[in-house]
Image: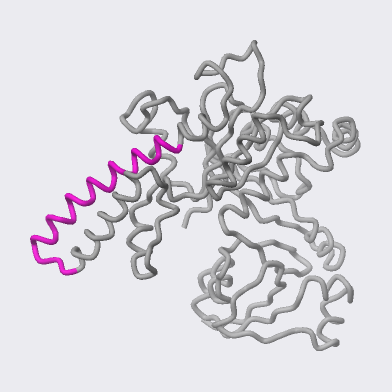
Amino acid sequence: MSLQCGIVGLPNVGKSTIFNALTASSVPAENYPFCTIDPHVGIVPLPDPRLFELEKIYKPEEVTHATVEFTDIAGLVKGASKGEGLGNKFLGQIKQVGAIIHVIRCFDDSNVVHVEGKVDPVRDAELIETELLLADIATLERRLIKIAKAARGGDKSAVRKIKVLEQLLEHLNNGRRARTFPAEVDDLSFIRSLFLMSRKPILYVANVDEKEIQNIDRNVHVQALFDFAEKEGNLAIRLCGKLEQDIATLEGNDKQMFLDEYNLPEPGLEKLIHASFKLLDLETFFTGGPKEVRAWTIKQGASAPEAAGEIHTDFQRGFIKAEIYNYNDLVVLGSEIAVRDAGLVRQEGKEYIVKDGDCIFFKFNV
């Protein structure tokens, strides 16, 4: 299960600027050090004001935020699916991430050359999606040949897989993305194993200039991209990469003054981080005590034992039950003891599906 978002884009669209802003961003998580795994991968804390309320209650030694991992994907040129430029590297990296952040230039500037000659956000979005589609078709064709050989060798499961592959190929050859393929539940596991890139969710980031970010109304480029995103069933946000890089270097009052000057309620990067978290179908639960208050990352729909496993595999293996209480109840009543006295702590078993914002104490035996 990949919890990474890959940042992609054509040359000169602001992709690296936004990635650099993320790696230097000063989101309110002073106790969580930004971690760079290598020059192109970074872990960024998820801004979550609920942690600060929990910190007031527990007064812990440490506060740890949930995180989102971003990968700065190698650049793309037309023909990447055929190995042009850094195409093979680009496509190989996309296969490893769970979601795609596509940065698209939505501003005119005669001093910044556009690789395609002029600014056209929808064309740029379709260019990359077409390359992903063509690469997926090649993947399916190769897999079909391999499974056909297995079928001739007596593999009974191969017959069904061949049918799914043929249906997927027809779907993609008609110009439709793999994420819109109406798969049957029994086939989902096999389809996931194909790592099709056009099946990944996409967040379009409309990169605008300093003047545009102050306008309430979207310019023609931004509106075209938002309309395209809605048609494709994807998300879109607007931010100014250059401005975000400046904001990321500021702290405290200086940052707030800068935001006020541009009439921004919050840094655009916070919107990007939260949207990425949503894109990956993630949510958080909390644990709290005198040593640490922490937000843990889980996939939506995770069971209590699976959530326990995020803390330690022993917790999942020896899971007995989970004590669950509501974040809002804790904040209103002011302490864990008060929540217990009010009878608001529930005992849940292995079938319980964890909800975003649950405060949990796990009981286990190994």
Q: Quadrant of residue 352?
A: bottom right
Residue 272 lies left or right of residue 306; in this view the side is right
Q: Position of residue 243 (x, y in %)?
A: 75, 28
Q: Quadrant of residue 135?
A: top left
Q: Position of residue 314 (x, y in %)?
A: 52, 74
Residue name at image x 51 percent, y 29 percent:
123
Magenta residue span: 129-156
Q: Is residue 55 above or below residue 213?
A: below
Residue 306 belongs to magenta span: no
Residue name at image x 57 percent, y 21 percent:
12
Residue 158 lies left or right of residue 50; in this view the side is left
As rendered, which of 171 and 312 lies closer to the eye?
171
Residue name at image x 34 percent, y 65 percent:
187
Residue 7 lies left or right of residue 333; in this view the side is left
As rendered, which of 127 and 307 lies closer to the eye?
127
As rendered, which of 108 and 200 lies closer to the eye?
108
Q: Position of residue 57 (x, y in %)?
A: 86, 67
